Image (spheres, grey):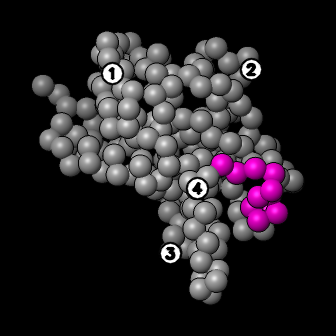
């Protein structure tokens, strides 16, 4: 029996289901709760483990670490984080903004909610001690949960940009802080920096 070497991780069941719907076949019981998983077969014949990790950095990393310690997951060599993320709209000369349906291949991530400036520690991407540079991690800015790429109302763009993560939603009130310390970031989510 060939054990899957790819683990596809989604924070929410809707995100996992959106991925599973693009597969050739999968279990009758798709993952629903944090820690749940199933084996799916892609159209190219490759089998992958698809898991719901839960929302937030701590929940996500705890559930993924627990599963990676199990025998069925020992063959995993790659983790692909999928799901929804918010695009950051900054004034970027020569760079486009991210739009619903776009795919972001991340090369760097850090946490936007881990601020130690009161302790005279650097904050943002300058804080290399808490910045992760990784090979490949894809995130899709989905127009709605569970959308399939072939249902998108426009073609999507693939971008290679940084992602920032935090255990809270980012809104307009955060724009000033983000523009100063995270001006290179394109996308914000809640799990990527922990999973990296």
Residue with the mark numbered 2:
154
* CB atoms of marks 3 and 2 within 8 Å: no
Mark 2 crowdedness (10 Å alpha carbons): few <14, some 14-19, many ≥20: few
Find residue 129 and name its label. Answer: 3
Instruction: Please give the residue where the numbered disc 1 appears in the rendered image.
Output: 40
Q: Which residue is identified by label 4?
A: 166
Give neighbour class at mark 1: few <14, some 14-19, many 20+ (Cα, 10 Å).
many
Magenta residue span: 169-179
Q: Earlier in the sequence, mark 3 or mark 2?
A: 3
- State the quadrant of the C terminus: bottom left
Q: Secondary structure at mark 4?
A: loop
Q: Horizontal and vertical percent for residue 47?
A: 30, 25
Mark 2 touches mark 1? (CB < 8 Å): no
| Residue 174 inside the magenta-drawn segment | yes
Q: Are marks 4 and 1 in contact (CB under 8 Å)?
A: no
Does residue 133 appear left or right of residue 187 in this picture?
left
Separation of disc 3 and disc 2 at Cα?
Answer: 39 Å
Q: Which of the two discs, 4 and 2, sits closer to the camera?
A: 4
Q: What is the secondary structure assignment of the residue under circle 2?
A: loop
**Number of numbered tags placed on the structure image:** 4
Check residue 124 for magenta coloring.
Answer: no
Against 138, residue 127 (above or below) is: below
Disc 4 residue crowd, few under 14, some 14–19, many 20+, Cα 10 Å: many
């Amino acid at each position: 029996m060939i054990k899957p070497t790819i683990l596809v991780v989604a924070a929410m069941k809707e995100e996992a289901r959106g991925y599973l719907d693009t597969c050739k076949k999968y279990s009758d019981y798709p993952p629903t709760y944090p820690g749940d998983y199933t084996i799916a077969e892609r159209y190219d014949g490759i089998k992958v483990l698809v898991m719901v990790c839960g929302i937030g950095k701590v929940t996500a990393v705890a559930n993924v670490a627990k599963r990676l310690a199990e025998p069925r997951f020992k063959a995993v060599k790659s983790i692909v984080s999928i799901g929804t993320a918010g695009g950051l709209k900054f004034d970027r000369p020569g760079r486009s903004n991210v739009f619903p349906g776009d795919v972001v291949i991340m090369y760097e991530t850090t946490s936007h909610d881990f601020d130690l400036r009161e302790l005279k520690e650097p904050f943002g991407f300058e804080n290399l001690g808490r910045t992760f540079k990784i090979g490949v991690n894809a995130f899709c800015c989905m127009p709605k949960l569970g959308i399939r790429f072939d249902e998108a109302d426009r073609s999507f763009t693939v971008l290679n940009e940084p992602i920032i993560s935090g255990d809270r939603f980012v809104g307009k009130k955060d724009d000033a802080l983000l523009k100063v310390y995270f001006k290179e970031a394109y996308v914000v989510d809640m799990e990527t920096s922990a999973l990296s």
